[in-house]
Image: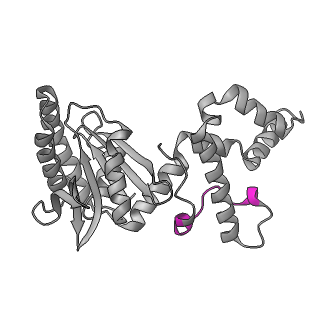
Amino acid sequence: MAKLSAKVSARITTQLKKYQSILASLQKRDVSEADTVTVINDMLSEICGYDKYLHITSQYAIRGTYVDLAVKVDEEIRFLIEVKAIGIELKDAHVKQAIDYAANEGIEWVVLTNGAQWRVYKVHFGQPIEKILVCELDAIGTSARSPDALECFGNLSREGFSKGSMAEFLLQKQVTNKFTVAAVLQTDFILEVLRREIRRMSSGVKVEVDYLRSLLREEVLKRDLVDGDEAKAALQNIRRLQRAATRKKGPTAKSVDDAPIVAPVEDASASLPRAVVAS
């Protein structure tokens, strides 16, 4: 997470608490998208610390069409924002157009929000263009003091946003999601530790690593954590991170499974793009 001063953290907490009651009221009234955009503009100013007249552009023009909001600092667009009316349930399809706009302009970050719900996406510049859902926050239901709230708005804030902090934010989310943790549990390194611990506790009972792997996949872990595209992508990403960590450790590393599970942040750029991709 971006390093925030006590002053910035206090601002995020105080202002979010204020806006939670405002958003709840707007939700009951089911206000329009235009009214929601106005509130988002105010939240970016009061919670995230941007100057609404200097840093925030409404109806930002890209190739003859418009994105609801763009946040721009020192002539560089930090992220685009697609806004939906507060009563509309967010769907991945809502952000497709903004993702395409961002890719055309080389912008890496896109936010989809209806005020109550916030989603932060990383744009992957490939063929085809892809998006990675990095975080999702319930701005009304989550405590204003919670780490999740500080993490989301802190990383988007004027003081906290940087390419380095966002890359670290993405990496942290990728290596701690449920699919990645399940993939780590299936690595030879972890299975060997488990095998040895079972043998130690049972005074010598032998069990094979392949048996433990099968047991985890078929009996212990939920099916969606070991099968499907997200599970396969997480496993591939773990292998990629292990290889990067082995290279970092140097020729003295005994094997990939002796290396740390997580690659250092400075190596993240080579490992990030395709970890857990939202289609």
Does the magenta run of residues contain 261?
A: yes
Q: How many marks?
A: 0
Q: Position of residue 105 (x, y in %)?
A: 33, 65
Q: Is residue 152 left or right of residue 235?
A: left
The residue shown at (53%, 69%) is 266
Segment tinted magenta in the rendering: 256-269
Q: Is residue 108 visible?
A: no
Give the image location of residue 246, x and y in percent: 70, 65
Quarter location, residue 101 = bottom left
Residue 34 position, x and y percent, is 12, 42
The structure residue drawn at horizontal position 22% and vertical position 51%, both measured from the top left corner, is: 12
- Quadrant into which the N terminus falls: bottom left
Residue 13: image location, x then y, percent: 23, 48
Nearest the viewer among 107 and 191 is 107
Colour mode?
one colour
- In this view, the residue in front, 79 or 142, is 79
Q: Which residue sits at x=36%, y=57%? A: 109
Asked whether the viewer can see residue 78, the reply is: yes
Left or right: 66 in relation to 118: left
Tell me if residue 257 is in the magenta stretch.
yes
Left/right of residue 103 with respect to residue 279 in the rendered view: left
Does 210 appear above or below 272?
above
In the depicted structure, whether residue 141 falls above or below residue 49: above
Residue at image point 29% right, 31% down: 89
